[in-house]
Amino acid sequence: MDFLTGGILCIGLLLVAMAIGMQIGLAFLLGGFLVSGLLLGFGSSVTLLGQAAYFSIASPTWAAIPLFILMGAFASNGGLARRAYNGVHAFARGLPGSLMVATCLSCGVFGAVSGSSIATTAIFGKMALPEMARLKYDKALSVGCIASAGTFASMIPPSMMMIIYALFTQQSIGKLFAAGIIPGFMTAIVYAVLIIVMVKRNPALAPETEPETTDANHVVMSRSREALQMWPVFLIAFIVLGGLYAGLFTPTEAAAAGALVTLAYGVLTRTFRSVGDVTAAMQESANVTAMLFLINVGALFYSRVLAVTRLPTELTMMLANWDVEPIFILIGIMAIMFFLGMIMVPIGIYALTLPIIMPLLVKLGYDPIWFGVIALKLTEIGAITPPVGLNVFAIKGVIPKAMNVSLEQIYKGCMPFLLCDLVVLVLLIVFPQIALWLPNLLMD
């Protein structure tokens, strides 16, 4: 078997393994090991797997991933999501669809200390959905709003997917974090505007909430007290991101500082009442880290096997020699990633595509930091599109059975927000400085 045929077989085996329901990390390992065994022999395949399992993740930067996961677990269990939600709702109260607007904006705020879109979706599903149901908000739109807004944690730093993208492409984590801030909060604002417009046109989607007191001073004081609840979220985000951009922390040290401060907050506010509460958060983080690292090791091994087959190099040269404008190649790449986003988890998409497309994109003159934001936006879209919308399944898992909401209704509720994501994606392509202005300002 020649090497190029091996590369095609490698991709085919991965798709077949996923089609039969194999866990994505194991699918990477199986497909990569079988092909490398055919091409290099059993002993060389074991050596290559050992290198991927150890040397590929032996750098200190990989330690940032479990530490950010731990920070997110402490933040989730420490009540910071509730503080973000109450604080933002204080500002949004009185707007059409105020609870959905508050959910969108507070998911953006909580994304600054979470890093996990699935966790954010599940937390706000448990917290906001019962209140929306009590006020008779439209069920499909409510769950679609929460599932879609949960994706902000993928874009707004600290983002696990940005760290993984950085490690696959050897880019600056700090620059990628900075590049995601404006697009992330811009998407949240676009969502909020969409909700206000939709509810104004059809008030039945979100009936009016209970009227507030007419005493202006009381209203101002009450809203101010609720808004001030968000101070721990902003403090933690300032310590993590401020320390990173001031040069005080490496990404790993910033993650450790964030986890420590978040833990201290939970202890001082007595949210963590016992050692068991802390160990429960640590056990949750360990489970997520183990699953994520299995996928990462499998993806890295798979990408190395693909590199050995020279399939990425040959495809890159073929695409580079096409007599078309670079924008059409970019659109083709995004179309492929969009399609893969509907059937694969993001790490799998990165492992399958980045070894092939990144050299080509750089050769065509595209900024890898900017494309990281584009890739993250496509990841957000994939999280709410069928058939494998991870956030859709996350919100489905926390919906009370009494609400009787089907997957079809959730996907339907996500569609207006999906259109918003596509609008933001077009703006990011047409105006790259939306993503690049802040990292250039902070890092250059």
Image (cartoon, helix red, strand yellow):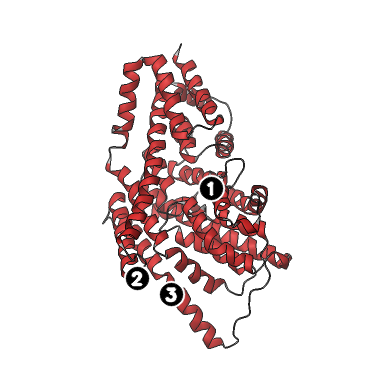
Badge 3 vs badge 2, beta-carbon distance below 8 Å: no
Label 3: element kind:
helix
Q: Position of residue 195 (x, y in %)?
A: 64, 62
Question: Can the viewer see residue 230 in this picture?
Answer: yes
Mark 1 packing: few (<14 Cα in 10 Å), some, or many (20+)? many
The amino acid pointed to by label 2 is: Thr
User: Does label 1 or label 2 sit earlier along the sequence?
Assistant: 2
Question: Is residue 430 in view from this perspective?
Answer: no
- Reply above or below: 64 against 322: below
User: How far is the residue under mark 1 from the one under mark 2?
Assistant: 33 Å
Q: Which mark is first along the chain, 2 or 3? A: 3
Depth order, front residue of 344/177: 344
Q: Nearer the viewer, mark 3 or mark 2?
A: 2
Going from N to C along the chain, the mark reached first, 3 or 1, is 3
Q: Which residue is mark 1?
A: 380
Percent from the top left, x then y, of residue 311?
Answer: 46, 22
Type of residue at label 1? Answer: Glu
Distance from label 3 to label 2 (Cα)? 15 Å
Q: Is 56 left or right of 397, judged from the image as shown?
A: left
Q: Is residue 377 left or right of residue 173?
A: right
Q: Which residue is mark 3?
A: 228
Q: In the image, residue 205 lies at what x, y percent?
A: 70, 64
**Residue at the disc numbered 2:** 269
In which quarter of the view is residue 201 placed?
Answer: bottom right
